[in-house]
Image (cartoon, grey):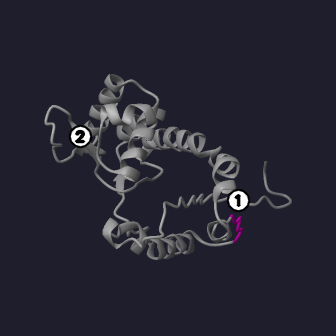
């Protein structure tokens, strides 16, 4: 069973695109556009930690790989507005050594970018939440023994649950809704060594 793409994520297979995205400013730009919609380089600049001109350069670089595109023109046509081509992205291990290497570079950057998210959430966000939202938050660390096909089925099941919430229009969101980040790390373990196995 192959992983589906129920959420409409852009699928990155080109090693050059993976390496291009494996940059803190570019990841920040893409995340900001995916979460908040179209923006100019000037509007993005404070959130991504780069000047407007540097942000504009990174936007053009992302556009070259099909990750962002021009949005509808604003009232002031002098300002170029950009948007993400999809609400999310995904990439695999890549083919060949170049693909595997690029995938590892992007994976490492994404892990580094999100490593302190739970700590920041605990320190900055969780104390401000009311009891309803605090009770809805959670953390789980589940260990299981599955085959690659079963793991793909689990991922497909998770996507089928998330799909209606990820893909719905803004107008369909309940009035008391707010952004929620769901972090999923799927980390297969190394094969178990048995007594007598060669080192």
Badge 1 element: loop
Q: Position of residue 137 (x, y in %)?
A: 64, 66
Q: Earlier in the sequence, mark 2 or mark 1?
A: 2
Q: Residue at x 34, y 63 (%)?
A: 8
- Which label sits on residue 81? 2
> Which stretch is magenta?
139-144
Q: Residue at x 40, y 69 (%)?
A: 4
- Which label sits on residue 104? none
Q: Note whether 46 is above or below 140 in the view shown.
A: above
Tell me if 177 is positioned left or right of 170 in this view.
right
Tell me if 175 is positioned left or right of 53 in this view.
right
Label 2 neighbour load within 10 Å: few <14, some 14-19, many 20+: some
Q: Position of residue 151 (x, y in %)?
A: 56, 70
Q: Note whether 1 is above or below 74 in the view shown.
A: below
Tell me if 39 is positioned left or right of 78 in this view.
right
To which quarter of the image does residue 9 belong? bottom left
Residue denoted by label 1: 191
Q: Which quarter of the image is occupied by the N terminus?
A: bottom left
Q: Position of residue 66 (x, y in %)?
A: 26, 44
Q: Position of residue 121 (x, y in %)?
A: 64, 51
To which quarter of the image does residue 70 belong? top left
Taking the image as drawn, is residue 5 in sight? no
**Measured Cα–Cα span from mark 2 to mark 1:** 48 Å
Q: Residue at x 56, y 41 (%)?
A: 113
Q: Nearer the viewer, residue 122 or 88?
A: 122
């Amino acid at each position: 069973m192959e992983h589906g793409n129920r959420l409409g994520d852009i699928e990155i297979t080109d090693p050059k695109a993976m390496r291009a995205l494996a940059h803190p400013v570019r990841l920040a730009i893409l995340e900001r556009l995916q979460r908040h919609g179209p923006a100019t380089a000037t509007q993005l600049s404070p959130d991504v930690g780069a000047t407007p001109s540097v942000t504009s350069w990174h936007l053009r670089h992302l556009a070259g790989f099909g990750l962002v595109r021009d949005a509808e023109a604003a009232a002031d046509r002098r300002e170029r507005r950009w948007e993400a081509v999809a609400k999310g992205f995904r990439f695999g291990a890549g083919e060949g050594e170049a693909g595997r290497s690029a995938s590892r570079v992007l994976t490492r950057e994404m892990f580094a970018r999100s490593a302190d998210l739970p700590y920041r959430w605990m320190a900055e966000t969780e104390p401000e939440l009311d009891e309803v939202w605090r009770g809805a938050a959670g953390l789980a660390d589940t260990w299981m023994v599955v085959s690659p096909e079963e793991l793909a089925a689990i991922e497909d099941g998770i996507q089928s649950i998330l799909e209606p919430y990820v893909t719905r229009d803004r107008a369909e969101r309940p009035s008391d809704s707010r952004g929620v980040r769901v972090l999923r790390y799927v980390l297969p373990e190394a094969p178990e060594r048995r007594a007598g196995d060669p080192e």
